[in-house]
């Protein structure tokens, strides 16, 4: 379905007047609508409006109609429910972006994500490779999909941990620093494409960091070097639907 320049503002008005905006936590403000309206490219403008729709809890579909997504913000964290008609059960994600990009990275901010997918909880760090199509500072208007083939040229989709690491692949080493200044060295399992690194005991790790204001993860070996700082504001609230989905 194509949207012209007259149809898009009408869609925005419907969002603004939606009864769902009565909730202060999910309200869409005029500034956000103006930001979307000012985007010249039709496809990018539609992505912006789709993001606002998901923020209100209104599902949106992928271009082939197989994926529907709802989204809500909890402080610095974003909660996503993604339903794939081909796979049945929905995936639940809570994720946040690093405060800064890595010195020698792609210019896109790394992501810390927790996901419940097919009853399995995972926590991982996704670091965009050099030359990644994701733009620096891009609004987190992203699909976060497991088990999908990478889509070339589509900046609206990132694929995280889509393949398990091959047997015998070396583990990466990283250092966790919490607000109390305590350092903990840990090992992470890489995805097959070396863009995501998984914590071996995610539920235990969540228990360690859930009450921290910020956490810093520094790659030591087997992954891009540099410190990634993640703000944990809203983390525990964003986890609740995910915990319910994975029953822990």
Image: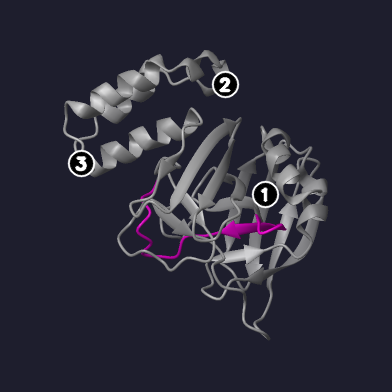
* Residue shown at 48% from the left, 31% from the top: 55
* Residue shown at 36% from the left, 50% from the top: 135
In the rendered image, is residue 102 in sight? no
> How many neighbours does mark 2 have within 10 angstroms: few (below 14), some (14-19), or many (20 or more)?
few
Alpha carbon of mark 1 to alpha carbon of mark 3: how far?
43 Å
Alpha carbon of mark 1 to alpha carbon of mark 2: how far?
28 Å
Q: Position of residue 132 (x, y in %)?
A: 38, 61
Q: Is residue 118 magenta?
A: yes
Q: Nearer the viewer, mark 1 or mark 3?
A: 3
Q: Position of residue 145 (x, y in %)?
A: 51, 57
Task: Give the vertical position of 11 relative to 163 (above or below).
Answer: above
* Residue shown at 66% from the left, 54% from the top: 217
> How many neighbours does mark 3 have within 10 angstroms: few (below 14), some (14-19), or many (20 or more)?
few
Q: Nearer the viewer, mark 3 or mark 2?
A: 3
Magenta residues span 117-136
Q: Is residue 66 magenta?
A: no
Q: Quadrant of the N terminus?
A: top left
Task: Give the vertical position of 3 relative to 105 (above or below).
Answer: above
Alpha carbon of mark 3 to alpha carbon of mark 2: how far?
30 Å
Label 1, secondary structure: give it: strand
Number of marks in the image?
3
Label 3, secondary structure: give it: loop
Q: Which mark is on residue 2?
A: 3
Q: Which mark is on residue 216?
A: 1
Q: Identify which residue, 158 or 112, lies in the foreground.
A: 158
* Residue shown at 30% from the left, 25% from the top: 11
> How many neighbours does mark 1 have within 10 angstroms: few (below 14), some (14-19), or many (20 or more)?
some
Q: Is residue 182 left or right of residue 153?
A: right
- Mark 3 in CB contact with mark 2 (< 8 angstroms): no
The residue labelled by disc 2 is 25
């Amino acid at each position: 379905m194509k949207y012209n320049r007259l149809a898009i503002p009408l869609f925005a008005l419907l969002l603004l007047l939606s009864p769902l905006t009565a909730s202060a936590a999910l309200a869409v403000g005029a500034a956000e609508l103006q930001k979307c309206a000012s985007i010249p490219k039709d496809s990018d403008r539609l992505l912006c409006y789709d993001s606002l729709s998901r923020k209100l809890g209104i599902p949106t579909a992928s271009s082939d109609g197989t994926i529907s997504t709802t989204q809500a913000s909890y402080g610095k964290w974003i909660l996503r429910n993604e339903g794939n008609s081909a796979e049945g059960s929905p995936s639940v994600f809570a994720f946040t972006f690093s405060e800064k990009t890595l010195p020698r990275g792609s210019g896109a901010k790394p992501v810390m994500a927790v996901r419940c997918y097919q009853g399995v909880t995972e926590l991982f760090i996704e670091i965009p490779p050099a030359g990644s199509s994701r733009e620096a500072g891009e609004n987190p208007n992203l699909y976060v999909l497991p088990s999908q083939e990478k889509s070339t040229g589509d900046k609206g989709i990132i694929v995280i941990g889509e393949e398990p690491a091959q047997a015998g692949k070396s583990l990466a080493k990283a250092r966790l620093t919490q607000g109390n200044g305590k350092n903990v060295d840990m090992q992470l399992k890489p995805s097959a494409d070396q863009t995501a690194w998984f914590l071996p005991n995610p539920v235990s790790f969540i228990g360690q960091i859930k009450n921290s204001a910020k956490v810093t993860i520094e790659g030591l070996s087997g992954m891009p070097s540099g410190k990634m700082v993640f703000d944990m504001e809203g983390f525990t609230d964003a986890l609740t639907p995910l915990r319910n989905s994975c029953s822990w």
